Amino acid sequence: MRITKRSAAEKLAAYLHHEIGLSALVDWAENAIMEGEFDPSESATLAHALGRVGLADVRPFGLTWEDSEAILHSLGYKTRVDIVAA
C-alpha cells in the first residue's frame, strides 16, 4: 500500500472525527510501517509520524489532542476545531 502525508493525515482525521477507533488507527499505522511504500522524500516524516501513532495504544504514550495537532503539522496540515450544536 502506498502511504503519503495526505493519506496519513486523512486517517488521523478519521480518528479525530470518531469515524474509526483508536485501535483501528494504531493497527493501520503499524501495518503502514511494516508493509507500506513511502515516497523517499516523505519517508522520514512518515516513519516518525506513524511510529508515534503506532504507540498510541500503550498507556504511557496515549494520543492527546496536542500530539495529534503536532503530527498533523509535521505532515503539512493545520488543525481547526468547529463547534456545532448537538
Image (cartoon, grey):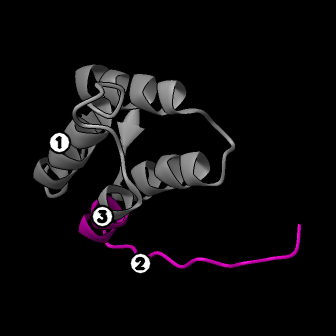
- Badge 2 local density, few (<14 within 10 Å), some, or many (20+)? few
- Tag in front: 2 or 3: 2
Cα distance between the residues tagged 2 and 3: 9 Å
Which kind of residue does numbered mark 2 sit on?
Lys
The residue at which mark 3 appears reads as 75
Of all residues shown, which one is farthest toward the front?
60
Front-most of residues 7 and 86: 86
Looking at the rendered structure, the secondary structure element under dot 3 is loop
- Residue appearing at x 36%, y 51% in the figure: 4
The residue at which mark 1 appears reads as 47
Magenta stretch: give its range. Answer: 69-86
- Residue appearing at x 47%, y 33% in the figure: 25
Looking at the rendered structure, the secondary structure element under dot 2 is loop
User: Which tag, 1 or 3, sits closer to the chain's start?
Assistant: 1
- State the quadrant of the C terminus: bottom right
Which kind of residue does numbered mark 1 sit on?
Ala
Count of picture labels: 3
- Tag in front: 1 or 2: 2
Cα distance between the residues tagged 1 and 3: 11 Å
Residue 13 pos. (x, y %): 54, 55
The residue at which mark 2 appears reads as 78
- Circles 1 and 3: CB distance less than 8 Å? no
Residue 35 pos. (x, y %): 30, 21
Left or right: residue 41 versus residue 63 is: left
Say above or below: 73 vs 19: below
